[in-house]
Image (cartoon, helix red, strand yellow):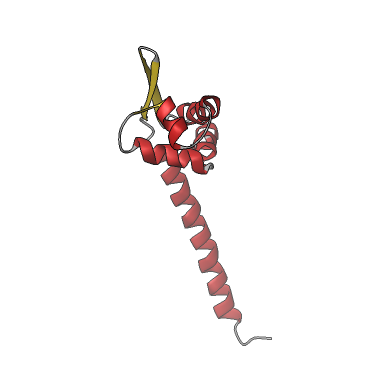
Amino acid sequence: MVQYSVLDATFAALSDPTRRGILRRLGEGACSISDLAELFEMTLTGIKKHVRLLEEAGMVVTEKRGRVRYCMLGTNSLEREVAWIRDYQLSLEGRLDRLDEFLNRTEGTS
């Protein structure tokens, strides 16, 4: 069974365009918090909040080197999330198929 708290954290993290942008940037390689703040024209406090949510979802890890904190992609491969979306899609397709069958059966009967 899917643990919804894990899904909730991931979908919440992905719900914001800034966080999706951070993930896109980190896909190119590690980056400091300061560089991310500059890239997204945000304060350090603001960018740290975004990074913290991504960390909680397992999508980003941070590492302190000296006085600088670096971010890199985490280990969350989104397999649970993809499986949930796939199951939901199958459910919707099943409902639409049943609706189509019903409409075909009742077509012309009034």
Task: Please tell me which residue lies in front, 87 or 48.
Answer: 48
Q: Is residue 104 visible?
A: yes
Placement of 99 over or under 25, stated as above or below: below
Q: Position of residue 49 (x, y in %)?
A: 54, 27
Task: Please tell me which residue lies in front, 74 or 33.
Answer: 33
Residue sitting at the far right:
110
Placement of 2 over or under 90, stated as above or below: above
Q: Position of residue 65 (x, y in %)?
A: 34, 15
Q: Residue at x 50, y 44 (%)?
A: 17
Query: In the image, is 45 to the left or to the right of 61?
Result: right
Q: Residue at x 37, y 38 (%)?
A: 25
Task: Please tell me which residue lies in front, 101 or 34.
Answer: 34
Residue sitting at the far top:
66
Q: Residue at x 61, y 80 (%)?
A: 106
Query: In the image, is 72 to the left or to the right of 84?
Result: left
Q: Is residue 78 visible?
A: no
Q: Position of residue 1 (x, y in %)?
A: 48, 37
Q: Quadrant of the C terminus?
A: bottom right
**Quadrant assignment, res 33:** top left
Query: In the image, is 69 to the left or to the right of 94?
Result: left
Placement of 74 over or under 84, stated as above or below: above
Query: In the image, is 67 to the left or to the right of 29?
Result: right
